[in-house]
C-alpha cells in the first residue's frame, strides 16, 4: 500500500471540489489500497475537522512546495531551515513522500502571468519534488499561460518551468493556447490536449468520497426559470458599474418575459456579488437568492432544473453543460472562449476585459430564450463525444506498468 497526493484541489470552491471528488473516486476505483492525501489549505486543526467525513486526509499544501523540498536531501533542508526556520521540515512529510507512488495536480489554472512568478514556479515545483522521490506526476487538464513574465527573473522562471514541467509523465492542457506554449515555446514532449476532467466524468460514486454519504440539500426550482452565477474575478478584470448594469438589464428583461431569476454563488467569494444583485431587486419576489452554500453535487441537482444560465465561474459552466444546460457567459480568459467553441456556442461568450456591448448581450439572451431547446440538444451531443475519453485511464496504465 502506498500514497497518492492530490494537489491544487479544494473543498470551498465548487469547481475545485468537483475535481477533488472526481479524482478521489477515480483513484479509489483503480487503486483501492492506496492512501489518498489532499494537499490543501493550511494543514491546521480546522482542516483536520473538514477531512473527518471523507475517504482522504488533508495535509498542509506546503508539503508539495518548500516543506516538501526540505524533505528531499539534507543539504537543501539546511539551506531552507537557515532561510525559513526549523518548522520548514517535518519528518511525517518525508514519510508520506517516501511512500508516495503518484502525484495528481488538478489546479485548473495556476501557471501563467495572471498568477505571477512565485505561484507559477511553486505549481511546477510539485512535479520536481515528486519526481525526486520517484513518484509519477500527472498534471490533469488545466490552463497554462500566457507566461510573459519579462526581465531577468522572467527568463529564470521560464527556464525552471520548462525544467520542472518536463518531470511530469503527462501534462494535459485544456486549451490550444496552453498546448502551444508547452510544446512550441518550451519544447516539451509530454503534453496532451484534453478538455476538463469534470466534463469527462459521467458519475461520482460518493461512497468512494465520503465515509458516510450526507443528506443533500434539495431545491424545487420554479418552472420557466434561469440562474445567474457571477464571479468576483470578473469584477476585478472588468468594471463593476458596467457589470451591474448588464445584470440589471438581463434580470429585467427575463422578468418581462415571465421568467423567475435565481442568484447562486458557485464559490464562497461570490456570495457578496449575489447579495449586491439581490439588493438591486430587494422587493422583487421573482428574483430569488439562494443563500445556502451548495456542494458540487447539490449544485448539479439544482442547475439541471433551469432553462439556461448566465454564468461566469468556469466550472459553473462545466457543471451546467454536464446537465445539458446551455449558458451565456461573462468571462475573463481564453479558457471561456475555447470551452464554448468546443460546444459550438462561442457566440454566447463575452469578455469583460473589453467593453461588453449591452445591446449584443441582450440580443444573445433573446436568442437563447427562443432557441434554448435546440442548444440543449447541441450540448448533450457534444458531451456524449467528450465522455468517450477519460484522462485517468492514462494513470491506470502507467500505474500498472510500475507494478
Image (tube, helix red, strand yellow):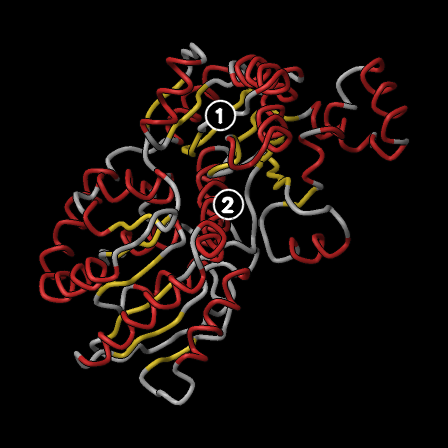
Instruction: Give 376 or 385, whichever is nearer the viewer.
Output: 376
Quadrant the N terminus occupies: top right
Q: Quote the CA–CA distance across marks 2 and 1.
A: 26 Å
Q: Position of residue 152 (x, y in %)?
A: 62, 15
Estimate the x, y position of residue 18 in percent, counting from the top left.
Answer: 45, 50
Residue ID at (44%, 53%): 234
| Vertical placement of residue 258 versus 214, above or below | below
Taking 347 as reference, is 396 above or below it? above
**Marked residue nearer the N-terminal end (2 or 1):** 2
The residue at the point 48 percent across, 55 percent down is 14
Residue 2 visible within the image: no
Query: Residue at horizontal 43%, vertical 34%?
Result: 142
Q: Residues within 10 Å of mark 1 (few under 14, many from 20)?
A: many
Q: Nearer the viewer, mark 2 or mark 1?
A: 1
Expressed as whole percent of the image width and height from the top left, the position of residue 372 reads 14, 61
Q: Name the quadrant containing residue 316.
A: bottom left
In this view of the protein, which residue sits in the foreground, 68 or 212? 68
On screen, residue 401 versus residue 49, left or right, reads left
Q: Which residue is mark 1?
A: 147
In the displayed structure, 29 sits above or below 249; it is: above
**269 or 218, which lies in front?**
269
Q: Position of residue 205 (x, y in %)?
A: 42, 51
Helix, strand or loop at label 1? It is loop
Residue 26 position (above or below residue 71)? below
Tell me the SS state at disc 2.
helix
Find disc 2 in the rendering and name its residue. Answer: 20
- Residue 216 in sight here: yes
Amino acid at each position: 500500500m502506498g500514497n497518492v497526493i492530490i494537489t491544487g484541489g479544494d473543498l470551498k470552491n465548487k469547481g475545485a471540489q468537483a475535481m477533488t471528488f472526481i479524482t478521489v473516486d477515480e483513484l479509489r476505483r483503480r487503486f483501492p489500497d492506496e492512501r489518498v492525501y489532499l494537499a490543501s489549505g493550511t494543514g491546521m486543526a480546522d482542516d483536520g475537522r473538514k477531512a473527518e467525513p471523507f475517504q482522504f486526509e488533508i495535509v498542509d499544501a506546503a508539503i508539495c512546495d518548500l516543506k516538501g523540498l526540505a524533505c528531499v536531501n539534507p543539504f537543501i533542508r539546511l539551506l531552507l531551515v537557515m532561510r525559513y526556520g526549523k518548522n520548514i521540515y517535518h519528518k511525517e512529510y518525508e514519510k508520506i513522500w517516501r511512500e508516495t507512488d503518484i502525484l495528481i495536480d488538478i489546479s485548473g489554472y495556476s501557471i501563467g502571468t495572471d498568477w505571477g512568478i512565485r505561484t507559477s514556479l511553486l505549481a511546477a515545483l510539485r512535479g520536481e519534488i515528486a519526481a525526486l522521490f520517484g513518484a509519477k506526476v500527472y498534471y490533469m487538464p488545466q490552463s497554462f499561460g500566457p507566461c510573459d513574465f519579462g526581465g531577468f527573473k522572467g527568463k529564470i522562471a521560464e527556464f525552471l518551468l520548462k525544467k520542472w514541467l518536463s518531470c511530469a509523465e503527462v501534462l494535459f492542457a485544456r486549451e490550444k493556447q496552453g498546448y502551444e506554449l508547452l510544446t512550441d515555446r518550451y519544447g516539451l514532449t509530454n503534453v496532451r490536449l484534453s478538455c476538463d476532467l469534470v466534463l469527462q466524468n459521467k458519475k461520482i460514486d460518493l461512497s468512494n468520497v465520503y465515509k458516510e454519504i450526507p443528506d443533500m440539500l434539495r431545491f424545487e426550482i420554479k418552472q420557466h426559470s434561469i440562474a445567474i452565477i457571477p464571479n468576483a474575478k470578473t469584477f476585478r478584470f472588468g468594471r463593476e458599474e458596467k457589470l451591474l448594469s448588464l445584470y440589471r438589464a438581463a434580470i429585467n428583461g427575463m422578468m418581462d418575459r415571465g421568467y423567475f431569476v435565481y442568484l447562486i454563488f458557485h464559490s464562497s467569494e461570490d456570495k457578496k456579488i449575489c447579495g449586491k444583485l439581490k439588493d438591486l431587486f430587494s422587493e422583487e419576489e421573482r428574483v430569488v437568492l439562494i443563500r445556502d452554500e451548495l456542494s458540487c453535487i447539490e449544485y448539479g441537482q439544482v442547475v439541471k432544473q433551469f432553462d439556461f444560465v448566465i454564468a461566469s465561474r468556469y466550472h459553473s459552466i462545466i457543471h451546467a453543460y454536464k446537465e445539458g444546460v446551455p449558458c451565456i457567459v461573462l468571462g475573463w480568459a481564453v479558457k471561456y472562449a475555447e470551452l464554448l467553441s468546443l460546444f459550438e456556442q462561442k457566440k454566447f461568450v463575452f469578455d469583460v476585459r473589453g467593453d461588453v456591448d449591452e445591446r449584443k448581450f441582450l440580443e444573445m439572451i433573446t436568442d437563447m430564450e427562443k432557441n434554448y431547446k435546440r442548444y440543449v440538444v447541441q450540448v448533450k451531443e457534444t458531451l456524449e463525444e467528450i465522455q468517450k475519453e477519460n484522462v485517468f485511464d492514462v494513470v491506470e496504465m502507467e500505474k500498472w506498468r510500475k507494478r
